[in-house]
Image (cartoon, grey):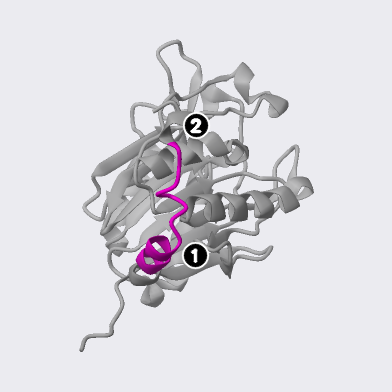
Amino acid sequence: MNTKHRTQQVIGVQFDIAWEDRAKNFETVERLLDERKDEIKKGAMVCLPEMFSSGFSLKVNKVAEGEEKETEGFLKKLAMKHGVYVMGGLVVRDEDRRGLNQCLVVNDAGEEVCRYTKIHPFSYGQETDFYNSGDEVVVFKWGELTVSPFVCYDVRFPEIFRHGAAKGAEVITVIANFPEKRIDHWISLCKARAIENQAIVVAVNRVGEDPFLTYNGRSLVVDALGEVRSDGGEDEGLVMWDIDLDVLDEYRGRFPALRDMRDDFLGI
């Protein structure tokens, strides 16, 4: 009898993002992954923070991808180098020249598989003055799992996560620049999104300072029961966990909360 469980590895890269300095941030990400390259499994999913190449900047003219698409190119090279899926936050221009705060996902062949635009720009931090909002919850296949990506402030809006669950999401990712002064909210919200959607939540934050705020990490992998399986603490480093697909399937089959969900209340 084969008792070996099916697993897929998730990795979050938590680091001090250098303000509006792509080259330095690329170097830091490469260093942190290279230091633990022997622990990275082929086909894993590596998640980088929101706007990981610049920090949470409102200077769209300075941080948006140009013709060279440097950040996009870096993600693709990183994925092929380690043989993994990679997701990370970047800025592109909309048709009206305002910004779009996006999460880009590439596969281990360096091919784009998903692009999500942040549905809720952070009005309290003036993001809405410079960035347009997205209008679609998306999912993509990663191995045997379905993933729905979100960005930072989105985590406060459970209705869009419910749409991800309705589309089959078993893993939810939240890439962020979530400040220290609201970190207790971050932890509680990530746990809530996992519990209510019976999903694995991979939440990747940054550490350090930008010109306006201080960040203390606490990147998390939360299981479908709301238990924290990996916690990045407050320093640079990686969070890692092997998702056990059989355990997730068994729990969802035994406790039918998702099957009891009323789609008519979601408007779908």
Mark sitting earlier along the chain (1/2): 1
SS class, disc 2: loop
Q: In the image, what residue occupies the spot 54% across and 62% down?
A: 222
Question: What residue sits right under mark 2 in the picture?
Answer: 118
Q: Position of residue 221 (x, y in %)?
A: 53, 62
Question: What residue sits right under mark 1 in the picture?
Answer: 32
Which image quarter: residue 54?
A: top right
Residue situated in front as seen by the camera: 81 or 223? 223
Q: Position of residue 169 (x, y in %)?
A: 38, 48
Q: Position of residue 208 (x, y in %)?
A: 69, 53
Residue situated in front as seen by the camera: 92 or 9? 9
Residue interval drawn in magenta: 248-262
- Could you classify mark 1 by the number of other residues whose Cα lies within 10 Å: few (under 14), some (14-19), or many (20 or more)? some
Q: Quadrant of the N terminus?
A: bottom left
Is 252 within the magenta? yes
Residue situated in front as seen by the camera: 153 or 198? 198
Q: Is residue 219 above or below residue 229?
A: above
Q: Quadrant of the C terminus?
A: top left
Residue situated in front as seen by the camera: 85 or 262? 262
Q: Say which amino acid is labelled 2.
A: Lys
